[in-house]
Amino acid sequence: MAVIKVPTNFNIEVDFEVPEFYRRLFSLIIDVLIEYFYLRIAGEIYSSISSYSSFDRDSQYNMQAIGLLLLLPVLLYHPVMEITMNGQSFGKKIMGIRVVNEIGGRPGISQFLIRWLLRISDLWIAVLLFIMISNPDFLRDAESTFIILSALAFLITDIVLVVSSKKGQRIGDILAKTILIRTNLKGNIEDTIFIDIADNYVPSYPQIMHLSDKDINAIKSILETARKRGDYSMAESASIKIKNHLNIVSGLSPFDFLDILLKDYNYLSTK
């Protein structure tokens, strides 16, 4: 399995496993099938509503509006899922992969949106699959053939980039500065940086609030990776850099120090 080294904000490289191509492919198939079956249900709903509508102009405009509303869940499927499920759609979750930014943290909303705006291929596949099954005569004219070839061109371009790119990035990932990584059942990197903290918790290092969310994500990634490997030097190196940056004096072990930093951040960021 390919491994990429991701530099964090603290100049410490963290290893991430690049998902095998078959995982991405099956993830895509699962998501396309979800979108397709939704379109089938939406199509039945639309047909049912239209059968009770009159044929005047106002009714036609109303039906167009209803059709657009029914289509919105498919159009917004990926950004909504990835934003609310911490970088995963249903397909990604089933196949154990997740979207992260280039330093291993949670991408920003703008990054998720850029990925979405440039993920044309799978949406086209779901829509075309629905149309071709619903209307077998769709393929008989030149315009339909051109649409299908265009969709396939986008898909093939993404596949070539994923296979040939060192980080397995497609067009949307390159421009959004995101990557796909493997997750595992034990979760070497937790889904979020947030931890349940008792109300009477007393933070030790309020200076932690001077760091950005990306820095906190980097600290968390380093801590989890160092624990997984039993790499004391990685945790120690990160601790020294953070202490110097925030002017903190602490005699705690590197692992305990980083743990407390994350707890302090969680407590102070919610107060």
Image (spheres, rainbow, N blue to C red):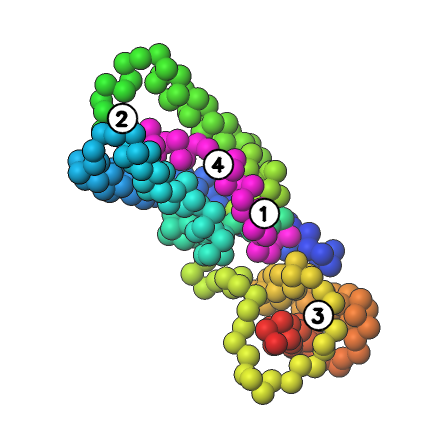
| Number of residues whose C-alpha sits closer than 10 Å to that of mark 3, classed few (under 14), some (14–19) or many (20 or more) | some
Looking at the picture, how far across and down is residue 23, in whole percent? 42, 44
Judging from the image, what secondary structure is the residue with disc 1 in?
Answer: helix
Residue position for label 1 = 110
Quarter-wise, where is residue 52 in the image?
top left
Residue drawn at 54 percent across, 47 percent down: 112
Residue position for label 3 = 209
Up the image or down, 225 lies above or below 73; here it is below
Q: Which of the marked residues, 1 or 3, is nearer the chain's N terminus?
A: 1
Residue position for label 2 = 132
Q: Which of the marked residues, 2 or 1, is nearer the chain's N terminus?
A: 1
Q: Which of the marked residues, 4 or 3, is nearer the chain's N terminus?
A: 4
Q: Is residue 168 visible?
A: no
Magenta-span inclusion, residue 149: no
Residue position for label 4 = 119
The quadrant in which the C terminus is found is bottom right
Judging from the image, what secondary structure is the residue with disc 4 in?
Answer: loop
The amino acid beneath tag 4 is Arg
Query: How far is mark 4 from mark 1, CA to CA?
Result: 14 Å
| Number of residues whose C-alpha sits closer than 10 Å to that of mark 2, classed few (under 14), some (14–19) or many (20 or more) | few
Judging from the image, what secondary structure is the residue with disc 2 in?
Answer: helix
- Asked if the residues shown at circle 1 and circle 3 are in contact, with their CB atoms under 8 angstroms apart, the answer is no
Residue drawn at 38 percent across, 51 percent down: 90
Judging from the image, what secondary structure is the residue with disc 3 in?
Answer: helix
Up the image or down, 121 lies above or below 4; here it is above
Looking at the picture, how far across and down is residue 61, in whole percent? 33, 33
Q: Which portion, as a residue range, is magenta?
A: 103-132
The amino acid beneath tag 3 is Met
Q: Which of the marked residues, 2 or 4, is nearer the chain's N terminus?
A: 4
Query: How far is mark 1 from mark 3, CA to CA?
Result: 23 Å
